[in-house]
Image (spheres, rainbow, N blue to C red):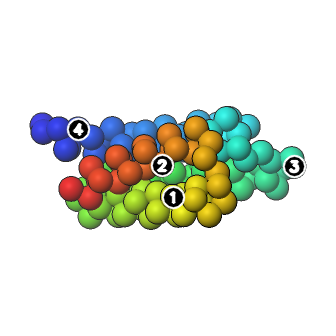
Amino acid sequence: MNLILIMKIISALATTATGLLVFIKPESAYAFTGLSAPGVRGISELRAIFGGLFIALGLVPFWLGTPAYLMLGIGYLTIAAARAFSIVYDKSYERSNIISLVIEIVCGVFLVM
């Protein structure tokens, strides 16, 4: 197994793990996104989007292979582009935002290789 494949697998597993964490414990999303849900409707959104969607995005590459890894990588790079814009435009230079940007770029690059 080569390094690129290992990084793809790690990226997909990390995506799945993030989704599982928020699905099981939605209040944990605040620690890495700054988002909180004051009511049950917000909690439902956290579970659905940051939970369910991330679980699917992380697991599907294991069934579909290369096209799904590529799709996940494009997704991460698009998120990184939007985050980079926000960091500059909104002056959101918080450490956690920069860390997220770096992780998204690294995962995205490996996933599209």
Residues at discs 4 and 2 in contact (Cβ within 8 Å): no
Mark 4 neighbour class, 10 Å CA radius: few under 14, some 14 to 19, many 20 or more: few
- Quadrant housing residue 36: top right
State the count of labels: 4
Q: Which mark is residue 39?
A: 3
Closer to the N terminus: mark 3 or mark 4? 4
Residues at discs 2 and 1 in contact (Cβ within 8 Å): yes
Give the x, y percent position of residue 82: 53, 63
Q: CA distance from mark 3 to mark 1?
A: 30 Å
Q: Amino acid at mark 3?
A: Gly
Q: CA distance from mark 1 to mark 4?
A: 26 Å
Closer to the N terminus: mark 2 or mark 3? 3
Q: CA distance from mark 3 to mark 4?
A: 39 Å
Residue 58, compared with residue 26, is above or below; it is below
Q: CA distance from mark 2 to mark 1?
A: 7 Å
Give the x, y percent position of residue 58: 42, 49
Q: Amino acid at mark 4?
A: Ile
Q: Which residue is mark 4?
A: 6
Numbered disc 3: secondary structure: loop
Q: Which residue is mark 2?
A: 101
- Of 40 and 8, the residue lying toward us: 8
- Quadrant housing residue 11: top left
Residues at discs 3 and 4 in contact (Cβ within 8 Å): no
Give the x, y percent position of residue 1: 12, 37
Residues at discs 1 and 4 in contact (Cβ within 8 Å): no
- In the rendered image, the residue lying farthest to the right is 39
Closer to the N terminus: mark 3 or mark 1? 3
Q: Which residue is mark 1?
A: 84
Give the x, y percent position of residue 34: 71, 44
Mark 1 neighbour class, 10 Å CA radius: few under 14, some 14 to 19, many 20 or more: some
